[in-house]
Structures are given as C-alpha cells and as structure tokens.
C-alpha cells in the first residue's frame, strides 16, 4: 500500500478525534502484514490520565481482533485546525510499537498537503527495551 493512501485513512480518522482539552487532534492508520487497515484517533478525558493516543487506539483495535503483525503506520496531527508538518509518536506509543513490530516497521508522518516523511521504528526508538 502506498504511503499517501495510508495517510488518507489517517486523515479520515483524525476527523473522529475527541480532544476538547488539548485541541490537538491526532489520526493514525495502521497497516497489517495481511493488508488490513485499522484506524485510531486520540480520545481525551476530563480526568486527563485516561486519555488515549491515536496510535494505541489503532493497535488495540487490531490486536483485539486477533491481528498482531504490522507493516506500517501513518500519523497525522492537527493543532487548532492547522495540520502539523509532522506529528511524531510519543515515547509510550513507540514502546507499544516495539512490543509488536520489527525495527523495519515504517512510520509515515503526513499532513493534508500530500507530503510525508518516512521513518522506521528503529530510527525513532533504537535499542528499545524488550523482555
Ligand atoms: N497524542 C496522540 O494521540 N499521539 C501521540 O503520539 C502524541 C499525543 C495525543 C494525546 C493528547 O490527546 C494530544 O495528542 C495532546 O498531547
């Protein structure tokens, strides 16, 4: 699947973001090795700590459906209605990726301008902790 096509899914997902406290809206689209796409958006909470990141929502949806092998993720972020040039995944999400993905797992950071950057999980979380 082409990166821009996966970013289109993330751009749809960000529309569902529930982020009334930060006004920072995130959408993610997770591509599985067998070609399925699971999307996620951030879901905030008035008590703050129960808030969920978009990437982990996408992983939870896939894993809870029995899919555990992943190829790539596209992430878009939007602050106060303005798309970020690139929205990097937080450290906790990187650690969740490291649990299920190889260092070659692709991370596409896109926006609404049909541009994207490509990283690997190995780039963004080298020497990750693993039991
Ligand atoms: N957020 C994500 O959804 N993914 C990340 O990787 C970083 C941060 C969300 C959490 C919160 O709802 C908002 O962005 C601001 O931190």
Image (cartoon, rainbow, N blue to C red):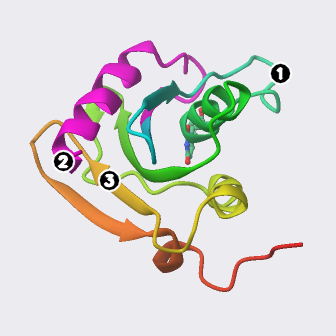
Could you tell me which residue is drawn at 67 percent across and 56 percent down?
Answer: 100
User: Which of marks 1 and 2 precedes in the sequence?
Assistant: 2
Q: Residue furthest bottom?
A: 127
Q: Which residue is mark 2?
A: 2
- Please identify the quarter of the rendering in which residue 45 is found: top right
Q: Is residue 46 left or right of residue 17?
A: right
**Label 3, residues with CA under 10 Å away: few <14, some 14-19, many ≥20:** many
Decide which of 57, 61 is in the foreground and name it.
Answer: 61
Q: Are marks 2 and 1 in contact (CB under 8 Å)?
A: no
Residue 33 can be seen in this image: yes
- Classify the position of the N terminus by image quarter: top left
Q: Which residue is mark 3?
A: 109
Q: Which residues are magenta?
A: 1-28
Q: Secondary structure at mark 2?
A: loop
Q: CA distance from mark 3 to mark 1?
A: 29 Å
Image coordinates of residue 20 in percent, x first then y, are: 56, 16
Q: CA distance from mark 2 to mark 1?
A: 38 Å
Image coordinates of residue 74 in percent, x first then y, are: 36, 45
Q: Is mark 2 within 8 Å of ligand 1?
A: no
Q: Which residue is mark 1?
A: 47
Q: Is residue 110 left or right of residue 59?
A: left
User: Which of marks 3 and 2 precedes in the sequence?
Assistant: 2
Q: Is mark 1 within 8 Å of ligand 1?
A: no
* Eye-nearest disc, 3 or 1: 3
């Amino acid at each position: 699947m082409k990166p821009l096509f996966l970013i289109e899914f993330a751009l749809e997902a960000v529309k569902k973001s529930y982020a009334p406290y930060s006004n920072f809206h995130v959408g993610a689209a997770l591509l599985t090795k067998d070609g399925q796409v699971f999307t996620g958006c951030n879901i905030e909470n008035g008590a703050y700590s129960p808030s969920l990141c978009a990437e982990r929502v996408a992983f939870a949806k896939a894993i809870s459906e029995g899919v555990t092998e992943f190829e790539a993720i596209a992430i878009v972020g939007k602050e106060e209605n303005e798309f970020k040039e690139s929205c990097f995944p937080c450290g906790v999400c990187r650690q969740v990726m490291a649990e299920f993905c190889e260092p070659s797992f692709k991370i596409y950071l896109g926006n609404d301008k049909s541009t994207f950057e490509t990283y690997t999980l190995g780039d963004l979380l080298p020497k990750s902790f693993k039991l």
